Amino acid sequence: MTLPLNPAMAATFPPPVMEARRWIQGLSFPADRPLLNLSQAAPVEPPPAELRAALAEAALHDPQAHLYGPVLGLPALRAEIAAQWSAAYGGRIEPAQVAITQGCNQAFCAIMATLAGAGDEVILPTPWYFNHKMWLDMQGVMAVPLPTGPCLLPDAEEAAALVGPRTRAIVLVSPNNPGGVEYPAATLEAFRDLARARGLALIVDETYRDFDSRTGAPHALFADPDWDGVLVHLYSFSKAYRLTGHRVGAVVASAARLAQIEKFLDTVAICPSQLGQIGALWGIRNLAQWVAGERAEILARRTAMVGGFSALDGWTLLGCGAYFAYVEHPFDTPSDRLAPRLVQEAGVLLLPGTMFQPEGSEAGARQFRMAFANVDQAGIAELFSRLAQVTD
């Protein structure tokens, strides 16, 4: 007997990172030519020792760390985010406008569950973050692609032409995953104005904001006194503090919207990880200088990526920033077929652009995402040496 399967789930594509891992199953790589894994945008090292000590202290001596907590998160963490974000963005955010989630992916799912249902539409710039597209597909929500062209920057006027009666939201990720580009403040403000004029939500995912190359606030959206009538802000503690396994994210939105999100969170997880929240709170209170060092290293790797592509014949760097370079390859073979070959022939694991574009996209067949956060500058130099030897 075959059990029923939700058609929307059946139509959702498999997780891309898990698919890529299957390409290396059963393979071995020599010690003098190890696999260069640029497939996943997540730290592979544990948090700094001081943060781990804070987690251990809580695990051993704080009984509350092992119990259910508030559905919307620890009050102290919500208050700290409100205070720090208010100062960083030059706006006013109240603790009641902050909720904590089990990672930023859950933050996206939670807000989307309150905004859009089956048959509704959400505008996603392409190339898009695949987990955003997957969640919309699972819910029967139509992802409307907004092409960004060779600059990878979305245009609000082009988005306006895609807004229809079932459009509920526009989603922007900056610094972008997968493109790496940092959206100018004017771009974000233009989308804010469009969303407000059309009665839509503007969702801005700033998971990688700690690695933005610019100094100061990347935008002034929170300086708008009525920001919570249109803006939803998403954040992740996974990247800056290496808390990937603890799953801590945040949503900043109106208190009324968070009351709706609470229904979703209570049903799905009851509460976010208590230990993860304790770690996140300790991190944002104590690790500013450490995070600055992490940012400096990522920016140095970004410089190495830009320099490497300037000397690599045939390849085109479309965007580079935060953890990512998004590139166009010079070969006739589509990227989804070329990617497994690169593992075998060059010992390089990349995600093809077909995982970030609508099905059948010609652009996706020519593109790759390179997540370089876990490859040091020597590894980046080796990457370009290997790519230079690849032929179609």
Image (spheres, grey):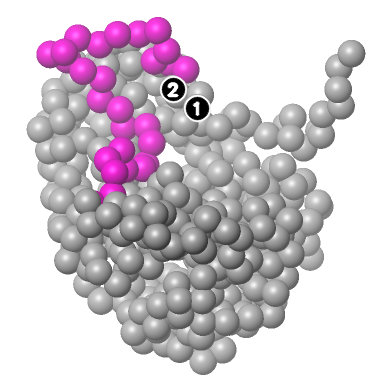
Please name the residue shown 43% across and 29% down the image.
352
Query: Looking at the picture, does residue 105 appear above or below residue 42?
Result: below
Q: Nearer the viewer, residue 41 or 390?
A: 41
Query: Looking at the picture, does residue 269 appear above or below residue 245?
Result: below
Q: Is residue 23 magenta?
A: yes
The residue under label 1 is which amino acid type?
A: Met
Q: Is residue 160 magenta?
A: no
In the rendered image, which quarter contains the N terminus?
top right
User: Splitting the image into 4 quarters, where does residue 392 fall?
Assistant: top left
Q: CA distance from mark 1 to mark 2?
A: 5 Å
The residue under label 2 is which amino acid type?
A: Arg
Position in image of residue 245 (x %, y %): 43, 44
For residue 106, side relative to residue 48 (left or right): right
Q: Nearer the viewer, residue 208 or 271?
A: 271
Q: Say few, some or many: other residues with alpha carbon within 10 Å of mark 1 (under 14 / 14 to 19 / 20 or more).
A: few
- Please name the residue that numbered disc 2 is placed on: 21
- Please name the residue that numbered disc 1 is placed on: 18
Q: State whether the magenta stretch is mostly helix, strand or loop.
A: loop
Q: Is residue 190 visible?
A: no
Please name the residue shown 19% across and 27% down the image.
383
* Magenta span: 22-48
Please name the residue shown 36% across and 28% down the image.
350
* Dot 1 and dot 2 residues touching (CB under 8 Å): yes
Please name the residue shown 29% across and 72% down the image.
285
User: Splitting the image into 4 quarters, where does residue 220 fall?
Assistant: bottom left
